[in-house]
């Protein structure tokens, strides 16, 4: 579980999804792993290819998505 | 007035309990007390009016100052007291994560059956409780927010309509007790069944959640088992949370942890014995 002032984020053990808890509005988001891959393939996230992304650890994937500003959309 | 101790919670039940006291004594052996005691929750049986007392008697349940249920005929009091006890916990206890499901435990491992109306959850949980499993609850999983373990309550299973006759043959008079049937409640005919003695309950402890089964009962279907994505399991279990949105961050963290380590299955079944055999393999 990775924690910021705003979010709790982790990837589920079976890699089916990232789950996000917004500490400000108390909403839970479940983002399918395939959705993230599609966002990488369609250029919504530009900083890394889907092949490179898949090779990362869960922690690295979450951090990569932080750097790409991906989690900001869940505020 | 009586005080009823369910292991996790105590209830003070006030008012005219004469018509249900004998049944409560059998459903909750060694758990009733007539002395004044501090209770977690207060349930008062009130007459609706003097005129109704004479003509068409009705009572209401005043639960912690609220009246969440419609007035009922006094003959329908027993199931209403049971529902009131459920209501107290789901409305007020936010120190634990409460999930709407039944919980069966064996070898210190718990199986959760999240509820869906018509899924046969209550019938199955009573059947398991009477056949070698410990029924921790047939209504809600009470989950410790620090450990993620599910905790037992000494409460009977609630049975509706045809389930009553299905379960009756499994009741062993020396170990279990099935209450009389209350006819014509808004949920149909209702009976309650105690699946263990107080001695057995007293030896139970918190249990790790090994699996969650989302049940689909259909007497015309073949037995089918599918493992589902943890993301789908998490979404489903959140929708069954009584107080997930009240607890917030701690509930999210512990549910993610539970989902990550549990087996999550969708099960279509027609025979309860098939489910029993399946979950027996999950707790070895």
Image: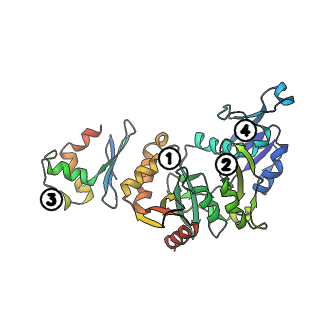
Quadrant in the rendering for residue B86: top right
Please give the name of the residue rendered at 32% of the width and 53% of the height, measured from the top-left corner: A10
Specify whether B3 is left or right of B97.
right
* Above or below for B64 versus A36: above
Mark 1 or 3: in front is 1
Quick one: SS at disc 2? Answer: loop
Specify whether B232 is left or right of B26.
left
Q: Earlier in the sequence, mark 4 or mark 1?
A: 4
Marks 4 and 2 on same chain:
yes
* Above or below for B166 versus B101: below
Name the residue tied to disc 4: B43
Mark 3 belongs to which subunit?
A
* Above or below for B268 versus B99: below
Mark 1 belongs to which subunit?
B
Quadrant of the snapshot with the C terminus of chain A: top left
Task: Name the residue nearer the viewer: B106 or B36.
Answer: B106
Please give the name of the residue rendered at 25% of the width and 39% of the height, measured from the top-left corner: A72
Name the residue tied to disc 3: A52
Q: Mark yes or no: residue B73 visible.
A: yes
Task: Name the residue nearer the viewer: B96 or B123.
Answer: B123
What is the x, y in percent for residue B142? 57, 52
How far apart in space, not on screen, are marks 4 and 1 (Cα)? Answer: 24 Å
Q: Earlier in the sequence, mark 4 or mark 2?
A: 2
Quick one: SS at disc 4? Answer: strand
Name the residue tied to disc 1: B241
Mark 4 belongs to which subunit?
B
Residue B9: give its label: 2
Mark 2 belongs to which subunit?
B
The reply to whether discs 4 and 1 touch (Cβ–Cβ < 8 Å) is no
How far apart in space, not on screen, are marks 1 and 2 (Cα)? Answer: 19 Å
What is the x, y in percent for residue B267? 47, 62
Quick one: SS at disc 1? Answer: loop
């Amino acid at each position: 579980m990775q924690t910021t002032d705003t979010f709790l984020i982790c990837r589920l053990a079976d890699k089916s999804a990232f789950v996000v808890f917004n500490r400000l509005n108390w909403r839970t988001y479940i983002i399918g792993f395939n959705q993230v891959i599609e966002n990488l393939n369609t250029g919504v996230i530009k900083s890394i290819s889907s092949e490179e992304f898949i090779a990362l650890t869960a922690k690295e994937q979450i951090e990569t998505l932080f750097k790409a500003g991906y989690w900001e959309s869940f505020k | 007035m009586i005080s009823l101790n369910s292991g996790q919670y105590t209830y003070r039940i006030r008012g005219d309990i004469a018509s249900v006291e004998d049944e409560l004594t059998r459903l909750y052996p060694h758990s009733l007390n007539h002395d004044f005691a501090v209770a977690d929750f207060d349930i008062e049986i009130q007459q609706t009016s003097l005129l109704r007392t004479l003509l068409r008697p009705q009572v209401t349940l005043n639960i912690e100052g609220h009246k969440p249920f419609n007035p009922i005929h006094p003959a329908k009091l027993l199931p209403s007291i049971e529902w009131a006890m459920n209501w107290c916990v789901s409305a007020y206890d936010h120190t634990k994560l409460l999930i709407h499901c039944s919980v069966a435990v064996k070898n210190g491992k718990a199986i959760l059956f999240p509820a869906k109306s018509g899924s046969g959850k209550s019938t199955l949980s009573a059947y398991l409780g009477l056949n070698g499993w410990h029924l921790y609850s047939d209504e809600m999983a009470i989950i410790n927010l620090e450990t993620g373990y599910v905790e037992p309550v000494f409460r009977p299973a609630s049975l509706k309509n045809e389930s009553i006759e299905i379960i009756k043959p499994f009741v062993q008079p020396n170990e279990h007790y099935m209450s009389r049937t209350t006819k014509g409640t808004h949920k149909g005919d209702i009976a309650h069944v105690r699946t263990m003695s107080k001695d057995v309950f007293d030896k139970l402890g918190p249990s790790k959640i090994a699996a969650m089964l989302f049940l689909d009962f259909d007497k015309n279907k073949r037995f089918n088992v599918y493992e589902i994505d943890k993301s789908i399991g998490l979404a489903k279990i959140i929708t069954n949370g009584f107080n997930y949105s009240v607890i917030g961050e701690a509930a999210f963290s512990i549910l993610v942890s539970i989902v990550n380590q549990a087996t999550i299955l969708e099960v279509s079944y027609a025979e309860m014995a098939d489910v029993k055999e399946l979950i027996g393999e999950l707790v070895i």
